[in-house]
């Protein structure tokens, strides 16, 4: 096995060269305008990351349809209306020397019901296992064709705007992964059934996107190792999908896992032994290395030490190390790891301020995980405002900022006649925990902030 360092460049199948082996993985920024366009806040944030020494920057969710957003503040790209703003976004990141890929996505049943026009849709009319969230309608053949075309269009606009590639989001419970899961895809037509039928949508998205862009433009995929739900998308099925992807012109495959019902990507649904060591999904990556040998693998989730990252790359288990939440508090994490300034990355622990006897309750754990995400989103918003991250930010401030961003109605059981609360990650958790946790938590925030 060659002795590969983290600073070694990586040449992708399409010829694009990434300057090193550390990737800033997607984090949902929620910094789009009211019209879902990028603005100066995203440029400020990506200027920080662009100067951070990463071999690759992957944006947060960019939705392929303005009518279907995962959360308020998503950027959406369905045509060239925001081409100038998108170009500024891409150039800001590239000025620091890092390539930037746009992560393209459709939320499916995880769409925010308040911002969704015409209701959410999914492969089948299977709702989230979260009380108060309305069930989606089953996508028609015309819906599927429309969405496939939208993925291709978004990729073409990304290339025109100057991005270096796109990453198709096929993980974390969004639409593409909904097609993959037997829990959410009950179809009996060509888009459902066995794993070959359920994988058809992902494979067709890849083909449409690849046909819409030039050969030098990169096309990547983010795929779950599993969705960590009983009867759901399993590691065995995931390996079958990797084998299918191996026959396509894919430039980088990022491995993650879980969904917002079972957030393994945050270490909360994996086993205790897995969560206690670095890289939750590295063992799985080793098992698929030979199934698509020409596609470089990136693994995201749990990397915190320079030695752990170096061992993963040197062992050949993966070719890229993905960093998510650490980059929200240390935007120059890659540079600091590569030059030896930092040997262990910060890993703040965010928890719900409730008595210890309630801490293991399912609702509390769910809310705690989603507050963790929102705490890190707060850090992105600070950088978007031109400020530094605040690693000491109290969780009470995060709860307040979440309420301010989404509104108190986002967390109630009935909103604008939708029949449910917001199904962004934080909205879903609040809908689940409102009566047992939210009201006391709001009182706590008010008592601490005087508001």
Image (spheres, helix red, strand yellow):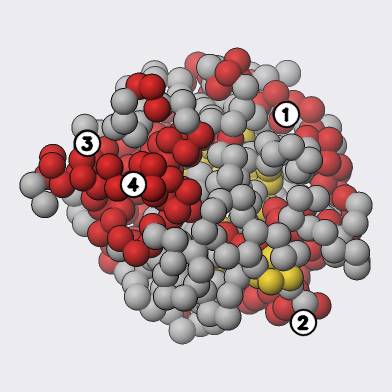
Real-space Cα separation, disc 2 to disc 3, in angstroms: 47 Å
Q: Is residue 328 left or right of residue 451?
A: right
Q: Residues within 10 Å of mark 4 (few under 14, many from 20)?
A: many
Identify the residue shown where x is 34% and y is 34%. 352
Do residues under tags 2 and 3 come within 8 Å of each other at their CB atoms? no
Q: Is residue 39 above or below residue 377?
A: below
Viewer-nearest of labels 3 and 1?
A: 3
Residue 114 in sight here: yes
Real-space Cα separation, disc 4 to disc 2, in angstroms: 40 Å
The part of the image, by quadrant, that contains residue 75 is bottom left
Quadrant containing the N terminus is top right
Residue 449 percent coordinates (x, y): 11, 45
Q: Which residue is mark 1?
A: 284
Return the mark for residue 142.
2
Q: Which residue is mark 3?
A: 394
Q: Which residue is mark 4?
A: 438
């Amino acid at each position: 096995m060659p002795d590969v360092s983290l600073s070694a460049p990586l040449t992708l199948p399409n010829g694009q060269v990434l300057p090193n082996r550390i990737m800033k993985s997607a984090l949902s920024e929620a910094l789009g305008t009211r019209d879902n366009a990028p603005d100066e806040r995203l440029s400020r944030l990506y200027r920080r990351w662009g100067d951070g020494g990463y071999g690759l920057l992957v944006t947060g969710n960019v939705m392929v349809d303005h009518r279907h957003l995962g959360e308020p503040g998503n950027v959406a790209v369905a045509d060239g209306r925001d081409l100038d703003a998108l170009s500024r976004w891409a150039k800001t990141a590239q000025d620091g020397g890092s390539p930037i890929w746009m992560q393209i996505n459709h939320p499916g049943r995880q769409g925010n019901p308040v911002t969704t026009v015409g209701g959410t849709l999914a492969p089948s009319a299977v709702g989230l296992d979260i009380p108060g969230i309305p069930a989606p309608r089953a996508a028609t053949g015309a819906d599927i064709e429309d969405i496939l075309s939208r993925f291709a269009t978004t990729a073409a606009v990304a290339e025109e705007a100057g991005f270096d590639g796109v990453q198709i989001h096929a993980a974390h419970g969004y639409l593409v992964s909904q097609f993959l899961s037997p829990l959410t895809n009950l179809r009996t037509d060509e888009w459902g059934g066995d794993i070959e039928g359920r994988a058809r949508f992902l494979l067709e998205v890849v083909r449409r996107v690849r046909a819409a862009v030039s050969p030098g433009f990169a096309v990547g995929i983010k795929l779950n190792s599993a969705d960590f739900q009983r009867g759901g998308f399993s590691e065995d099925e995931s390996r079958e999908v990797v084998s299918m992807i191996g026959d396509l012109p894919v430039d980088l495959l990022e491995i993650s896992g879980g969904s917002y019902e079972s957030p393994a990507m945050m270490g909360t649904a994996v086993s205790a032994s897995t969560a206690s060591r670095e890289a939750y999904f590295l063992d799985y990556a080793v098992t698929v290395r030979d199934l698509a040998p020409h596609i470089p693998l990136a693994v995201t989730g749990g990397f915190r030490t320079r030695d752990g990252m170096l061992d993963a790359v040197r062992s050949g288990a993966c070719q890229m190390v993905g960093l998510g939440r650490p980059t929200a508090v240390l935007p120059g994490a890659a540079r600091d790891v590569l030059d030896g300034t930092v040997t262990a990355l910060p890993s703040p622990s965010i928890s719900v301020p409730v008595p210890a006897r309630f801490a293991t309750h399912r609702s509390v754990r769910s809310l705690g995980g989603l507050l963790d995400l929102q705490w890190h989103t707060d850090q992105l918003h600070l950088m978007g405002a031109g400020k530094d991250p605040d690693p000491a930010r109290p969780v009470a401030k995060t709860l307040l900022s979440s309420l301010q961003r989404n509104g108190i109605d986002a967390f109630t059981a009935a909103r604008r006649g939708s029949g449910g609360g917001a199904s962004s990650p934080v909205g879903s958790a609040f809908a689940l925990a409102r009566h047992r946790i939210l009201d006391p938590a709001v009182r706590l925030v008010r008592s601490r902030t005087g508001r």
